[in-house]
Amino acid sequence: MTADKYHSTHFLLLLFIGITWTFFQGIPVVAQGDYCQESPWKGKKVFKEKGCIECHAIYGRGGDIGPDLGKKQFYGTYMQLASLMWNHLPRMFSVMENRKRPFPKLTEKDMNQLLAYLAFIRYISEPGSEHRGVQLLRSKECTACHRFGGEGGTLGPDLSKRKEYLSSLSMVRAMWNHGPKMQEIFRRKGIEPPEFSGTEIVDLTVAVRSYMSPARVPSSAFNLGEPSKGKKLIKTKGCLKCHAVNGKGGKVGPDFATVDFNYSVTQIAGKMWNHLPKMWEMMSSEKMAFPKFTDEEMADVISYLYALKLKDPPGDRKAGKEIVKQRNCLSCHPLRGKGSKDAPDLAKLGPLSNPVSLITKMWNHAPIMKKQLEKKSLRWPWLSGKEMTDVYAYLQTMAKKK
């Protein structure tokens, strides 16, 4: 089997190997510790075992009742993802009743793993286009320095003679590590440094592979990294001398937490490359050492940058209190012993050590809640991600007061 055929038929399987998600941090208004510390590949198992795959597909693999979650990509924070699941429940109940399927109860660990998996689906790289890639080799002037299929320049290595399989991440890592040398060549030859957007990095990689001999594809070729390791690497590699994370670090470059990293792994890698000329110029003037990365380190750093955008802003306790009233929660739930006795007291839901605790309780409580709402002719309480964050802040405060 050739490398490209192997890549296309086993692409998704390999991508999920070795993904680890351990970064999510607590909402700062209320102390809660870290959460969502499970590996997304474990979440894939939950997605199958709990029957989600019977209705939803991931890139064409699974049911067709609900949207394909690989194609209908999610952009947002952790709690926004949780709110989508919550608001989806009425439709889900209807389908499950028609199919006579039991409601899937989740442990807090299950919920951790499932949400981590769903949050990382859109992070996976695209397959790429060889045709577009071949055009990019010329338009980005790669052929001015490198040879492909016996044609091109000789200043750089002949990439078609590479013996190891070339993944998109390996391509970016090699470009990054050779960046300073490449910048000198660009300057000397009067070449404008190429920039990449969209799927161009993937397209370029597929094109380069088309000139290579078939190579064995190791599972490490699609390692997408561990955010917890990436968090440490941006310190040890000196990134925080110029960049900050949520205000902590250097002021020369932009704060990583404010940069838009809502992209796939290869698109984020392309943005890092685009940043290189300006960064190298500044580092040269300050005589700073240029940070180089292994494939694994590059994957870890990029996964950390992606994870930063999934963090939710602080919750508003007062707003949460109003939402509890407006969504008719008190028509069933008592509060400190006052009110209806049809559901648990909201002040006794604690301890809510993190948002997953609340989300899991809400999820497992949903079938009983549905019956109570129907009995009282009340509508399902729709909640946005921000509202869920506010409700969590309020309920945790109530638990602490108790």
Image (tube, rainbow, N blue to C red):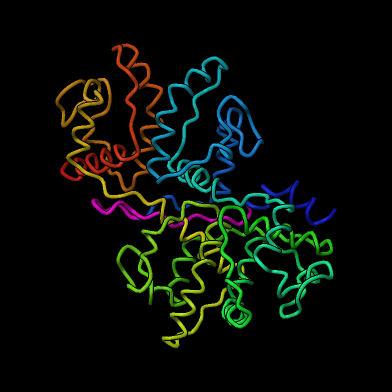
Residue 313 located left or right of residue 198: left
357 sits to left or right of 391: right
Q: Judge from the rendering whether residue 59 lies leftward or rightward of residue 82; answer left or right.
A: right
In front: 95, or 237? 237
Q: Where does the image place residue 63, in percent across and percent down from the top left?
A: 63, 28
Residue 22: within the magenta? yes
**What type of secondary structure mainly makes up the magenta span?**
loop
Q: Is residue 162 above or below residue 322?
A: below
At a point 47% along the width and 21% down the height, the residue shown is 93
Magenta residue span? 17-33
Residue closest to the far front: 190
**Quarter occupied by the C terminus:** top left
Residue under the image location 30 percent in, 44 percent down: 352
Q: Is residue 15 above or below residue 45?
A: below
Report the residue at 30% width, 16% height from top: 378
Q: Position of residue 28 (x, y in %)?
A: 27, 54
